[in-house]
Amino acid sequence: MTTSTEPPYYLLVSHSSFQHSSGLSSNSLAHASIEYRYADDSPLILLSRHPDEHVLVLNHDPAKGDTPTVQSTSSHMAVTGVKVSVAPGASANEEHSANDNMYVLEVTSTSDDQ
């Protein structure tokens, strides 16, 4: 895994849900819709626009060089972790100077309603 000062380019959301009836857990991966916000933007833009929207805030600070932190603004979804790995085939494009790491944001529902 290489470190980069560029913001994450490859983002997936891994939603884990616990199946109460069977006792088994299941995972699904989804592409996140990305909107860039900056420290001087109003915090109100981080609120959900409709009831079914879940907003995850990924804080990326290139000066720190650490793994970004992720928070959920939804009361129905919680972030359980962030996995960072090299995105397969991402470094094949030598002319592209993006962050070649893949970020998987692990989330789970906080209510019985899936």
Image (spheres, rainbow, N blue to C red):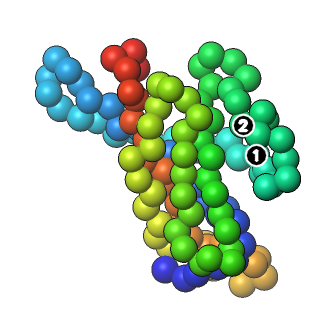
Q: Is residue 84 visible?
A: yes
Image depth: mark 1 or mark 2 in front: 2
Q: Considering the numbered disc 1 on the image, is that residue within a helix, a strand or a loop?
A: loop
- The image quadrant that residue 97 belongs to is bottom right
Q: Which residue shows up at 39% across the image and 36% down it?
A: 108
Residue 59, image x and y in percent?
A: 63, 57
Q: Position of 100 compared to 1: left or right?
A: right
Residue at 68% over, 41% down: 33
Kind of residue at disc 1: Glu
Give me the residue at 78% from left, 33% from top: 44
Q: Residues within 10 Å of mark 2 (few under 14, many from 20)?
A: some
Q: Using the rendered view, name the quadrant where residue 93 is placed.
A: bottom right
Closer to the camera in the image, 65 or 28: 65
Tag 2: amino acid: Leu
Q: Position of residue 22 (x, y in %)?
A: 14, 23
Q: Earlier in the sequence, mark 1 or mark 2?
A: 1
Estimate the x, y position of residue 46 in percent, counting from the top left.
72, 37
Question: Which residue is at the front of the view, 62 or 21?
Answer: 62
Q: Compute the Cα span from label 1 to label 2.
A: 10 Å
Work out whether 30 lies above or below 66. Answer: above
Name the element at disc 2. Answer: helix
Residue labelled with disc 2: 46
- Residue in view at x 55 percent, y 39 percent: 72
Left or right: 39 in relation to 14: right
What residue is shown with label 1?
35
Q: Is residue 87 among what the camera can see?
A: no
Query: Could you tell me residue 74's position as x and y percent?
Result: 55, 29
